[in-house]
């Protein structure tokens, strides 16, 4: 069982930055790929970024490439999402998720087995 707790959301002006954190309660954190997804009101949950268990591979949605950076600290069992140059369209609830490294690094939500409760990010124009 994996428990995930996100933090770091908030209200920021367009062009600003936020760093989200997701702390995992699990024995072997590096055994899980980690992903960030987001869901805006009235929209489906969408992929944002993912990082492999070792941290050696990452993947990003086109909409955030060059602005967002995913990273992880396996010693602290935490994954981060650094978000720069935020835009109003980035407004959403952001969720972190975990997927066993036995499968490939995925960008699809159904592949992930464990989810956090989400943290709200609001970007004002």
Image: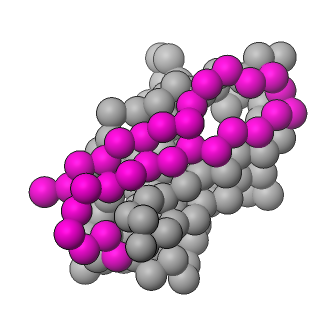
- Name the image colouring: one colour
Count the marks. 0
Q: Is residue 12 magenta?
A: yes
Q: Residue furthest left?
A: 1
Q: Relative to 54, is 67 above or below?
A: above
What residue appears at the point 51 percent right and 77 percent down from the top-left corner?
55
Q: Position of residue 1 (x, y in %)?
A: 13, 57
Classify 44 as above or below 6: above
Is residue 63 visible to the viewer in this orientation of the structure? no
The image shows residue 71, relative to residue 61, as above or below, that is below
Q: Is residue 51 magenta?
A: no
Does residue 73 appear to the left or right of 61 in the view shown? left
- Corner quadrant of residue 118: top left
Q: Residue at x 43, y 49 (%)?
A: 22
* Percent coordinates x, y for residue 75 in the rendering: 41, 73
**Depicted 41 relative to depicted 62: above or below:** above
């Amino acid at each position: 069982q994996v428990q995930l707790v996100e933090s770091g959301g908030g209200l920021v002006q367009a062009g600003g930055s936020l760093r989200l954190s997701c702390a995992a309660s699990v024995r072997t954190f590096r055994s899980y790929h980690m992903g960030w997804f987001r869901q805006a009101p009235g929209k489906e949950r969408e992929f944002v970024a993912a990082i492999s268990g070792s941290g050696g591979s990452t993947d990003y949605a086109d909409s955030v490439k060059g602005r967002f950076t995913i990273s992880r600290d396996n010693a602290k069992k935490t994954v981060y999402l650094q978000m720069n140059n935020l835009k109003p369209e980035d407004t959403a609830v952001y969720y972190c998720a975990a997927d066993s490294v036995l499968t490939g690094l995925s960008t699809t939500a159904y592949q992930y087995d464990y989810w956090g409760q989400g943290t709200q990010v609001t970007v004002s124009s």
